[in-house]
Image (spheres, rainbow, N blue to C red):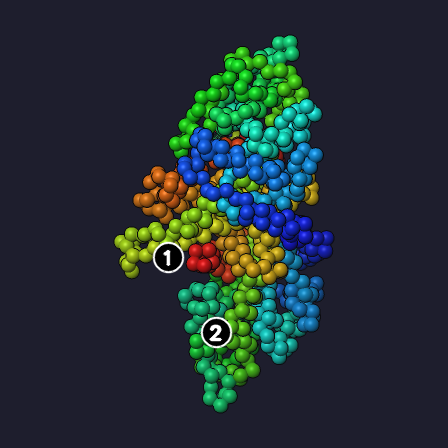
């Protein structure tokens, strides 16, 4: 066991820290929601800056524009971004999920066409998996693609597609053989979102912003060269992508959660506690023992999650595969965020219901609402527990 | 960064596992529970012969000079066997003895401790139940003309006091902390059992009334006493967390195995999703507690500047997780899990006593709060 950073890891971190000190943009002045075009451009500019400095797609092989960074360096990157309160990476789906899948399975033409624009933020991607009747049971998906000469013709509907309203491309799962067993007739297509016959309809999330969408496909022509992997071999592609998604979401989320807790801690001295609940007189939330317990609980939850994530990363670095700890990360952070934001709401008392995101109260209430989605997106908590039970603990399938 | 135990660390673990499978199967644990002291002279000697008693003690005192990661590796195995007796309390006290900066006392007592002939414990807690030494009220008064110290006070929850030849007594000397090294059974010392639910480790009330000890019994005072006690407590806390991890591993293995074999409604209960999801949570808690324990052990070994915070994070997490895991393990077993005969109860009770030992989650969360809110 050795948890010290190697000289090269330390050098990487110091260099990054220095770079961030002089390259971090001013915080965005406005509502930081993805449907806001100005915010989107702000984020794209940030990603381009990261790309130009070689900090986009760190773990991608150097041959594809990455730095072949180790998982530990990736984790340091995330930590430093959190420390610097850096903006989100807008092309995270492309960098974390779609790019690595194209690297693993794509043709040379596909690699040439998509990888660099994904890193630079020039191409934003969305992930068209879920359908109205196919959520957890993803393999039952029904959007159809029928071969017509050199093209496929796609008809059907996707739903809950994050970023589809701004995406240039969609990583789409379609059914190409409806006679085959459900896992065997699926194909993955890389679809230009400007294609004729595509309609995107934003859906508002309960948090108020419209970050996910419905996509309707009506006789959309997709050239056969846009198949990723093999025709009817899309399930394997989907699994590769989902594994990457769960691993990468966790890393990104660590930044977000740490930042939220910092904001909350900084606000504590300003949050009054009702004197009726403290006969000794009025005090600020920072002094209230119950508040202190909640804040410390959030902190330790987050720290233990981080240690488990580091352990999973270290395991990937040595074994090439995530250990049992890998499969529990998504479950851990999504439920931890719900606990943490719930605690923050209790601490803020009546202020917790206020919605103006320019104020800390609105930040808290937004985070609280948004956290409800965490245990649904990228595999519901129930589905993840099924996976742990079946694949890690060896129980029979329960459904 | 590498979380895997090294080859020597793994070897150490397997030698402890081998020793305990031979010398400490659960039948033996149950026999010892039923005794007054839960202490087994022969078993203790085996631990000493393998170097485990002096695992982290300095080589100049015949210890092995290893670090907190090795300690965690060993304690994890001990926890998986629910090893009875004074390993933790003795480790805590001997580490204090070794780090308090008093060569005379260290020389007099560490060797007999390492070779297994003497055991030590620390008398810290009082009626308030506060693990923070700042709360200590037992008094020490310097006697005139170098006449030593007069000690009075009432200590509770003192682990294994009945089998300890040496009791390290934490007192207040004026405004300062002072730790005295007392031989068990000196005149004016009373030791009385406090029967507790975890019978594998016995607790005692130790009272001193009008005891005068010579000046050379003062192990350390002031800042030195505080720092040495903090150091020893940090290390012992990691050992307690590692024990909890070992216990959680036992409970998880036993529960998953049971759920695969127990049949109801014509199928294994492990085919039911409600049971599966409980088991998935066992694994989540176990693996998270393991990540935290070894990260914190590393921080202790390396004297990381954040070590206090990381140890508190880990103890708070492990304390709550182990209680959850032990409860859930019983639930999956149904009626058999609620019996005296089933070994789950041993691990359930150990989870509770280790949760309280060195401070529960509430205590450690307040410590964390001081570090992250009041800084
Ligand atoms: C914020 C957000 C962003 C999203 N972004 C995207 C995206 O970009 N692209 C995309 O393709 N999808 C996206 N999704 C969709 C997401 O993947 C699905 O919502 C999810 O897979 C669940 O599917 P469902 O909504 O149809 O619910 P259902 O599958 O109908 O589930 C309903 C309930 O039943 C439970 N359930 C279902 N099957 C089982 C079972 N076998 N055992 C136990 N319980 C079960 C579920 O856990 C859940 O509680 C997003 C969702 C959210 C909330």
Q: Nearer the viewer, mark 2 or mark 1?
A: 1
Q: Quadrant of residue B237?
A: bottom right
Image coordinates of residue B215 in percent, x first then y, are: 53, 83
Q: Is residue B244 left or right of residue B9?
A: left
Q: Residue at x 66, y 27 (%)?
A: A111
Q: Position of residue A26 (x, y in %)?
A: 47, 43
Q: Nearer the viewer, residue B121 or A384?
A: A384
Q: Callout 1: 10 Å neighbours few (<14), some, many (20+)?
A: some
Q: Chain of mark 2?
A: B
Q: Residue at 41%, 28% (x, y): give it.
A: A204
Residue B160 position in % (x across, y down): 54, 67
Q: Quadrant of the C terminus of chain A?
A: top right
Q: Secondary structure at mark 2?
A: strand
Q: State yes or no: discs 2 and 1 in contact (Cβ < 8 Å).
A: no
Q: List the residue tagged with mark 2.
A: B177
Above/below status of A338 relative to A115: below
Cβ of mark 1 under 8 Å from ligand 1: the answer is no
Badge 1 element: helix
Asked which quadrant contains residue A323, the reply is: top right
Quadrant assignment, res A250:
top right
Looking at the image, the residue that sits furthest to the bottom is B145
Asked if residue A291 is positioned above or below residue B261 in the image, the reply reads below
x and y percentages locating residue A20 in the rendered image: 55, 46
The label number, if any, that marks residue A287 in the structure image? 1
Q: Residue at x 56, y 32 (%)?
A: A121
């Amino acid at each position: 066991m050795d948890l010290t950073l190697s000289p090269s890891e330390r050098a990487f971190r110091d260099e990054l820290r220095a770079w961030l000190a002089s390259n971090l943009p001013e915080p965005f002045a406005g509502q930081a929601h993805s449907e806001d075009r100005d915010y989107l451009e702000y984020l794209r500019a940030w990603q381009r800056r990261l790309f130009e400095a070689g900090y986009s797609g760190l773990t991608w092989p150097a041959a594809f524009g990455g730095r072949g960074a180790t998982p530990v360096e990736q984790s340091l990157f995330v930590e430093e971004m959190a420390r610097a309160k850096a903006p989100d990476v807008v092309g995270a789906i492309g960098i974390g999920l779609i790019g690595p899948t194209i690297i693993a399975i794509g043709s040379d033409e596909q690699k040439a066409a998509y990888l660099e624009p994904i890193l630079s933020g020039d191409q934003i991607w969305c992930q068209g998996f879920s359908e109205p009747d196919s959520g957890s049971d993803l393999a039952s998906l029904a959007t159809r693609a029928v071969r017509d000469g050199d093209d496929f013709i796609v008809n059907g509907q996707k739903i809950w597609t994050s970023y589809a309203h701004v995406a240039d491309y969609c990583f789409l799962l379609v059914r190409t053989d409806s006679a085959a067993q459900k896992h065997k007739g699926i194909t993955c297509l890389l679809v230009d979102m400007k294609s004729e016959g595509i309609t995107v309809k934003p859906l508002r999330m309960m948090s108020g912003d419209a970050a996910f969408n419905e996509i309707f496909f009506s006789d959309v022509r997709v050239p056969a060269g846009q198949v990723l992997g093999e025709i009817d071999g899309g399930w394997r592609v989907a699994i590769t992508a989902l594994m990457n998604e769960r691993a990468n979401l966790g890393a990104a989320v660590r930044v977000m959660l740490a930042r939220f807790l910092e904001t909350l801690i900084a606000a504590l001295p300003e949050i009054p506690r009702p004197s009726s609940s403290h006969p000794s007189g009025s005090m600020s939330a920072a002094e209230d023992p119950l508040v202190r317990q909640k804040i410390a609980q959030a902190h330790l939850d987050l720290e233990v999650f981080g240690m488990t994530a580091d352990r999973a990363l270290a395991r990937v670095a040595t074994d090439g595969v995530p250990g049992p700890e890998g499969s529990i990360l998504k479950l851990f952070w999504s439920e931890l965020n719900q606990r943490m934001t719930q605690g923050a709401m209790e601490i803020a008392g009546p202020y917790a219901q206020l919605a103006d995101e320019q104020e800390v109260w609105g930040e808290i209430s937004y985070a609280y609402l948004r956290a409800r989605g965490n245990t649904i997106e990228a595999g519901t908590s129930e589905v993840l527990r099924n996976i742990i039970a079946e694949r890690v603990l060896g129980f029979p399938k329960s459904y | 960064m590498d979380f895997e135990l090294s080859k020597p660390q793994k070897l150490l673990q397997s030698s402890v596992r081998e020793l305990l499978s031979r010398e400490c199967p659960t039948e033996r644990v149950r026999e010892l529970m039923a005794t007054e002291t839960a202490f087994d002279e022969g078993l203790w000697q085996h631990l000493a012969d393998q170097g485990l008693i002096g695992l982290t003690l300095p080589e100049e005192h015949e210890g092995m000079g290893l670090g907190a990661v090795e300690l965690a590796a060993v304690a994890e195995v001990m926890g998986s066997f629910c090893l009875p007796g004074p390993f933790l309390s003795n480790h805590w006290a001997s580490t204090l003895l070794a780090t308090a900066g008093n060569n005379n006392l260290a020389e007099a007592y560490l060797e007999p401790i390492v070779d297994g002939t003497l055991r030590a414990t620390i008398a810290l807690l009082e009626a308030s139940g506060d693990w923070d030494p700042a709360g200590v009220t037992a008094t020490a008064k310097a006697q005139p003309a170098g006449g030593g110290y007069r000690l009075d006070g009432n200590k509770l929850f003192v682990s294994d006091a009945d089998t300890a030849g040496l009791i390290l007594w934490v007192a207040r000397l004026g405004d300062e902390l002072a730790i005295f090294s007392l031989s068990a059974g000196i005149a004016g010392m009373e030791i009385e059992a406090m029967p507790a639910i975890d019978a594998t480790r016995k607790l005692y009330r130790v009272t001193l009334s009008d005891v005068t000890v010579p000046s050379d019994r003062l192990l350390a005072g002031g800042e030195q006493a505080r720092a040495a006690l903090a150091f020893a407590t940090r290390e012992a806390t990691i050992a307690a967390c590692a024990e909890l991890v070992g216990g959680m591993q036992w409970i998880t293995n036993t529960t998953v195995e049971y759920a695969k074999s127990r049949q109801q409604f014509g199928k294994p209960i492990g085919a039911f999703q409600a049971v599966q999801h409980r088991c998935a949570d066992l694994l989540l808690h176990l693996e998270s507690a393991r990540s935290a324990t070894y990260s914190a052990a590393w921080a202790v070994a390396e004297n990381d500047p954040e070590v206090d915070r990381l140890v508190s994070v880990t103890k708070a997490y492990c304390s709550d997780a182990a209680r959850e895991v032990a409860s859930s393990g019983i639930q999956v077993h149904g009626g058999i899990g609620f019996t005296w005969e089933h070994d789950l109860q041993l691990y359930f009770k150990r989870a509770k006593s280790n949760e309280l030992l060195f401070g529960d989650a509430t205590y450690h969360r307040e410590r964390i709060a001081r570090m992250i809110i009041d800084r």
